[in-house]
């Protein structure tokens, strides 16, 4: 049991520490002076993580593999939502004040952004499905399955929660405020790139199936 959980932890952390959309969103909200919004986004992300991990155990990854169109629809929706967020960030970068900066989004919107973007990324389910299939025995005990889901949830909470706290420190916020417009638009561009990547991947896969 312990060896399986260690393998899951290593594989999960190897992916968590690679900067991606979640890192950009949490960093943007935290550094802009809204720790509460950053934490709300983390709650949304980790809630979606818990849902996907639970569904992966239930075999949703197998369903996505058997019916790729379902995964592609979710992927396109996720890409479009990321482009929407990218546009909001880009516009916010053009509205920077000199003394202070208004939060890009409130707590409810931040939770929604964190949850929806993670929930509309079916690759998360495929990742957890492959990790669990690799690290767990063929017929794992219910206790081991619950421990595996709890482990990836705890990892996600620890990593993203730490980012929210560290990046909302006064020195980080002060540096951010000095370059708010540029950094906000860079964040918007990065989010937009992630959105385009999701859309392009879906289109390429659809073309491959049609060929």
Image (cartoon, rainbow, N blue to C red):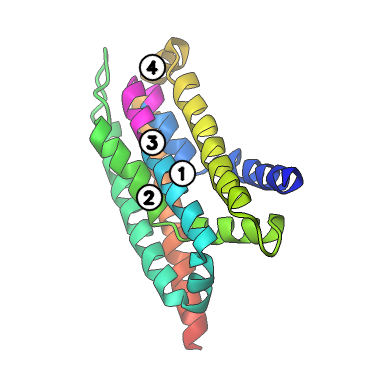
Sequence-first tag of 2 and 4:
2
For label 4, the residue is 178
Q: Are marks 2 and 3 in contact (CB under 8 Å)?
A: no
Q: Are marks 2 and 1 in contact (CB under 8 Å)?
A: yes
Nearest-to-viewer mark from 2 and 4: 2
Q: Secondary structure at mark 3?
A: helix
Query: Is the stretch drawn in magenta largely helix, strand or loop?
Result: helix
Nearest-to-viewer mark from 4 and 1: 1
Q: Are marks 4 and 1 in contact (CB under 8 Å)?
A: no
In the rendered image, is residue 89 in sight? Answer: no
Q: Secondary structure at mark 1?
A: helix
Distance from label 2 to label 1 (Cα)? 9 Å
State the image quarter where residue 147 is shown. top right
Residue placed farthest to the right in the image? 3
Residue placed farthest to the bottom in the image? 211
Distance from label 3 to label 1 (Cα)? 15 Å
Examine the rendered structure and indicate whether residue 135 appears above or below residue 152.
Answer: below
């Amino acid at each position: 049991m312990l060896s399986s959980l260690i393998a899951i932890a290593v594989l999960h952390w190897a992916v968590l520490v690679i900067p991606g959309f979640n890192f950009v969103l949490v960093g943007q909200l935290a550094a802009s002076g809204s720790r509460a919004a950053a934490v709300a986004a983390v709650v949304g992300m980790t809630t979606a993580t818990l849902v996907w991990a639970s569904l992966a155990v239930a075999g949703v990854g197998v369903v996505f593999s058997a019916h790729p169109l379902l995964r592609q629809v979710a992927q396109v929706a996720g890409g479009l939502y990321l482009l929407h967020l990218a546009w909001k960030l880009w516009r916010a970068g053009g509205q920077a004040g000199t003394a202070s900066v208004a939060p890009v989004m409130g707590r409810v919107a931040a939770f929604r952004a964190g949850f929806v973007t993670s929930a509309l990324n079916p690759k998360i389910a495929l990742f957890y499905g492959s990790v669990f299939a690799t690290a767990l025995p063929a017929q794992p005990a219910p206790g081991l399955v619950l421990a595996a889901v709890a482990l990836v949830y705890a990892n996600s909470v620890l990593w993203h929660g730490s980012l929210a706290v560290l990046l909302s420190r006064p020195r980080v916020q002060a540096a951010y405020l000095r370059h708010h417009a540029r950094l906000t638009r860079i964040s918007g561009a990065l989010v937009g790139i992630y959105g385009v990547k999701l859309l392009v991947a879906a289109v390429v896969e659809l073309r491959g199936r049609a060929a």
